[in-house]
Image: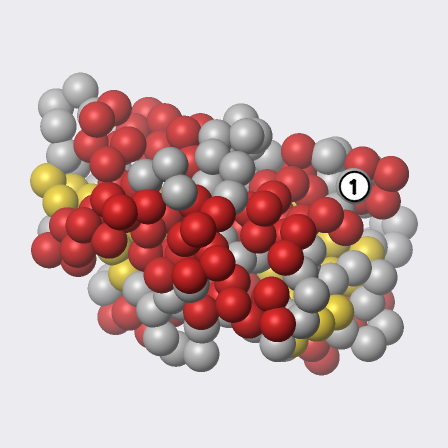
Amino acid sequence: MEIDVTFTPADLKTSRPSGRTVVVIDVVRASSTMVQGLANGCTGFLPVRTVTEARRRALTLSGPPPLLGGERRGVRLPGFQLGNSPLEYTAETVAGRNVVFSTTNGTAAIDASGGAATVVIGSFLNLGAAAEHAVRLGADVTLAGAGAGGRPVLDDVVCAGMLAQRIQELSPGGAVLTDAAQLALLAAQPYQGRLLALLRDSFSGRALLAIGYGQDLEFCARLDALPIVPTLRAGWVTK
């Protein structure tokens, strides 16, 4: 098994993920929010790139009206019932409901994963569950950071490094790390046991602190808190 890391959606597109397991990572916050929502009974997230598409899809889906969730620059979008804070996705709000979901970076990374054999959503919250699932699938793995504004962010890189280490440890025949995966592993080493410090150090975390979402960082820093493996199937992210 080979483990590779990409740092932005553009990197993922050019890496040709065909036939691989892609784990999309947007720690702060889309990945963490989807994990939390599904853990609390959300039936599925429909990730879309644009706000216009989100509103259109919400009107055209059959069945009960879905919730609209998402943000731009960290802030809930006008007319959306939910933002991108995992703390908003309580069982009382999302159980039994679908969410049409559009975020600044995370849904772009999902969109860039076209051609992958399997697309999984990864975060610190479900790191162990995602690693175990990737090992069970047996295909080569790409750990795909969402980044921010087309640039890598520290929280996604460290999460990718910790996932690479966990997958390597769990693989019966071992795993070969590309140079990019080794760089992510090196970035993760100073933050072992210090995930909240990591999120406060990262560009993503500092941006959230500036707009009053410090509690989200504490939530997203919980390692192996939820045994959920969100997987993309027919355009929907479900358990």
Picture quadrant where residue 189 is located: top left
* Image coords of residue 43 (percent x, y): 72, 40
Query: Is residue 98 depicted above or below 91 in this figure?
Result: below
Badge 1 density bin: few <14, some 14–19, many ≥20, Cα 10 Å: some
- Horizontally, residue 1 falls left or right of residue 214, namely left
Residue farthest along the top direction in this orientation: 172
* Image coords of residue 136 (percent x, y): 33, 25
Q: Split into 4 quadrants, where in the image is the N terminus? A: top left
* Image coords of residue 122 (percent x, y): 45, 44
Query: Is residue 217 depicted above or below 151 in this figure?
Result: above
Could one spot residue 13 in this view of the protein?
A: no
What residue would you read off at disc 1?
Answer: 90
Picture quadrant where residue 163 is located: top left
Residue shown at 32%/39% (left/top)? 192
Q: How is the image coloured?
A: secondary structure
Does dot 1 land on a helix, a strand or a loop?
loop
Front-lying residue, 71 or 113: 71
Residue shown at 43%/45% (left/top)? 195
Residue shown at 18%/50% (left/top)? 186
Q: Split into 4 quadrants, where in the image is the C terminus? A: top right
* Image coords of residue 231 (percent x, y): 51, 41
Q: What residue type is labelled 1?
A: Thr
Query: Is residue 193 depicted above or below 114 in this figure?
Result: above
Residue shown at 39%/77% (left/top)? 150
- Horizontally, residue 215 falls left or right of residue 106, namely right
Could one spot residue 215 in this view of the protein?
A: yes
Picture quadrant where residue 37 is located: top right
Q: How many labels does the image show?
A: 1
- Horizontally, residue 221 falls left or right of residue 19, namely right
